[in-house]
Image (cartoon, rainbow, N blue to C red):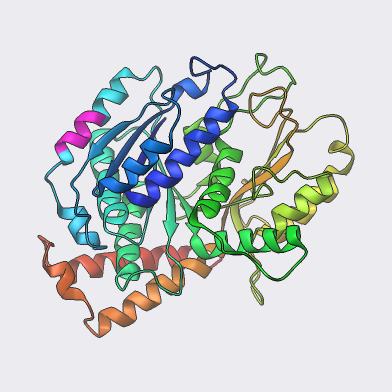
Amino acid sequence: MIVLQIGQCGIQVGQSLFESLLSENVASDYVHYPFSLLSQIAIDTERKVWNKRSRLSNSTLFDPFYLDHGSSGRGNNWAHGYYDDSKIDEIMESYRKLVESSYSYDGCMLIHSLAGGTGSGLGSRLTQEIRETYGKNTIMTASFSPFITGETALQNYNSLLSLSVLQRNVDLIGFFPNDSLLASVTKHQSIKSHSDKIRKIHIETLNEYAVNCLLGQILPITPLADPTINLQRFNTLDFIYEMTPSPLHKFCLFASSNVSTNHQMDSWDDTLSNLLRNIPPEPNFIPSSVSSKLVLRGVIGLDVNKRLDQLTSRWQQRIGQSFIPSTNPNIVFSQLYGLNVKDCKRTAETCFNSNLILKYLSPIYDKSQSMYNQKAYLHWYNRYCTNDVSELFDDAFETVADVLTSYDL
């Protein structure tokens, strides 16, 4: 799998992901299977983010392709990132080289933000280019939505336009709302400190939790305590097939019991309680899921099996029963957290395709519609858009409206 990291958010989360994979890599001088099947491309239009990450990195085992796409950014403008063709050919050529050098190319994962210009515009453009060139291979994303209180004036427009392109080209959209990430980290720190006074939370802490959510799904499964026996690597096609049974239901939410790497749970009851605490509740809302997956890592002995029904019942109540009878919840056990036999960490992670996504998509759609009705900020898109802006937005509103309707379960 090729991991594409686009823009500041994509690079920060992507490099944090590979640092975590490195800590699970049991070899010191080479990349252990199945991590050896991963490769990465980092692309940004502002060099400062990559320069900082390069200084902090102390390993070349996961050596990335870095493509410098300029130094001035994309002005938090989706159209600037999407319609700028200056280095698309260079990016796709680098992508082609990675595909052809891969032992087993099974698709890509795009990590990006929906709010800015590079992550949203260039990121969504690349999904279109990759789909046209590699039509039979899978594309999944880790898409980070902006804080609802506002990061930029154009964030709702950018998110709407980006999501419409992703819906047309991507097989699975992993949706990571910044507000949800912040709520989980805040609750964790409050419980850990036994106080309501929370110290300042840095973006690196949010990224760490998001990476833990991803790791719970993409780390290999080790049914036996020996990772050399019956190791099950992450398969993007299988994951997409089980999580997105319908073309109109591509949005998946993630949660993990493991908010902080240094925080360990003493029991499975505590582990599951921490996981459920990180699935945001919605008052007066009946959850219903399209598909769901629960991964329990660090399962040693029979303590889980004895209480499995009780544990999974609590999880299903929070995410909602599946309205598609054929998509029963998938529960996976791994004896180890990853590959390190000395790691005694136990975690619970879930991925679920649910109508809870409406909580995050509806405000984006409604605020964009309100701004568009007033013709607010459209001149920013006219500056770079090569097509008629009204047609661009009409198509985006129609695409996202269809998604909202499909999740009104």
Q: Residue at x 36, y 43 (%)?
A: 52
Q: Is residue 314 left or right of residue 407?
A: right
Residue at the extreme bottom: 374
Can you say whether 76 is above or below 307 in the image?
A: below
Q: Position of residue 113 (x, y in %)?
A: 38, 55
Q: Which residues are magenta?
A: 89-94
Q: Is residue 111 above or below residue 121?
A: above
Residue occupying image coordinates x 78% and y 45%: 265
Residue 288 seen from this side = no
Q: Nearer the viewer, residue 117 or 349?
A: 117
Q: Main secondary structure of the magenta part?
A: helix
Residue 19 visible? yes
Rendered location of residue 50, percent (x, y)? 33, 42
Residue at the image point whose x is 24% and y is 70% from the top: 394
Q: Quadrant of the N terminus?
A: top left
Going 19% across and 30% down the picture, which residue do you hit?
93
Q: Is residue 91 magenta?
A: yes
Vertical arrangement, residue 381 with respect to residue 126, above or below? below
Q: Which quarter of the figure has residue 233?
A: top right
The answer to whether 79 appears left or right of 188 in the picture is left
